[in-house]
Image (cartoon, grey):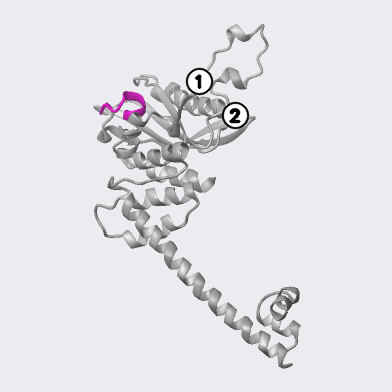
Amino acid sequence: MQGKDITEKMLEKYNDVFADILNVILFEGRNVVEESTLIDALPMSMLKIDGRVRTQERDIAKYWRKSKINVALFGLENQTIANKLMPLRVFGYDGAEYVKQSRKENIDKAKYPVITLVLYLGYDKKWNCPKTLFEVLDIDEDIKPYVNDFKINLYEIAYLDRKKIDLFKSDFRILADYLYQMRVNKDYIADKTDIAHVEELLTLMSEMTGDNRFEETINDLKGKENINMCEVLDRIEARGIEKGIEKGRLEGRQEGIISTLVSLVKDGILNVDEAAIRANMSTEVFEKYIK
C-alpha cells in the first residue's frame, strides 16, 4: 500500500496532472486552473496534541494563485482502499491550514478557502465508508443541533462517466481509463495517447497491477519520444515471451540434470539421498523420478 501512495504522489506532483484533475472533476473540463498558477505547498503540518508536537502529511497540496495572491489551497488525497476515518483526516488537514491563516503574522493577509479532493482509486467495489463527520462521530441527540457536520469531497475515479474520463488531457486520463476498463470489462485495452511522464506513470501502473514488467520497461523507453500505452504493452508482452523462453530453457536444463542423477543412482554410483541433494529437492520427491 505504501508503494501505491508514493507512486500516486510522483505523478500528481506535476502541475499539468494536478491542474487537469481539478479542471475535469470540478469544472467539467474547462481550463479554469492553469498550470502556471499552481505553487507547491508544504504537505506537512504540525499539531500540538496532549502536550506533544505531532505531524500530519497530505498526499499533495498546491496553492492556486493569481497576481501572487492565494485564491485557494487544493489538496489531493489518494485512497485505493476505503478508509472509515477519512472525514476526520481531511478535517484535520483543512483545519491546520485555517489555523495557519489565523496566526498573528497572517492576520492582515487575505484569507482563502481550503479544498481537499479524495480520489478513490479502487475499482473492484465502491467506497463503503463514511463520507461525513456525522457518520463517524457518536453524537448524543441532545447536542447534535450544535455540532457542525463536515463532508469530504469524494470522487470514485473508476465510477466516473465515460464522457468525463475522456475529458482528462494529462497522463491521469490513462490511469482513469485503466480503472474504468478494469471495473467494466475486467480487462484493459490501451489506446495511442502519448505519455508525458513515462517513468512516473509506468511505476504507478506497476504498483496498481502488481506487474513488474511495467517498471522493467522504463529503461527500454528512455530517450524515446511519442511513447504510448500500446507500445508499452507490446514491450511488456515481448518481455513475457522472453521470460517464458528462458523458463523453458531452465526447466529443460533441470530435467537433464535429474536424468543424469537418476542414471547415477541406478548404476550404484550415488545413493538416493546424495542425488536428491544435488538436484536441490527432497529425497521423497527425487524417488518419484526413479520409479
Q: Magenta stretch: give its range.
A: 22-32
Q: Residue at x 66, y 85 (%)?
A: 261
First reached walking from the N terminus: tag 2 or tag 1: 2
Badge 1 element: loop
- The disc placed on residue 48 is none
Residue 159 sits in which quadrant? top left
Q: Is residue 148 above or below residue 68?
A: above
Residue 240 on image: x %, y %:
44, 62
Mark sitting on residue 151: 1
User: Relative to 219, is 149 above or below?
Assistant: above
Report, in whole angstroms, how far the alpha carbon at label 2 lies from the one at label 1. 13 Å
Camera-side residue of 78 and 255: 255
- Mark 2, secondary structure of its residue: loop
Percent position of residue 275, x then y: 70, 84
- On the question of residue 22 being in view, the answer is no
**Residue 49 makes an appearance in the image:** yes
Choose top left, top right, bottom left or bottom right for residue 267.
bottom right
Frontmost residue, 81 versus 103: 81
Residue type at numbered disc 1: Lys
Based on the displayed image, in which of its 4 quarters is residue 13 positioned? top left
Residue at point 43% right, 64% down? Answer: 241
The quadrant of the picture occupied by the N terminus is top right
Viewer-side residue, 194 vs 104: 194
**Image height check: is 121 above or below 133?**
below
User: Which residue lies under the disc numbered 2?
Assistant: 84
Residue 26, magenta (yes or no)? yes
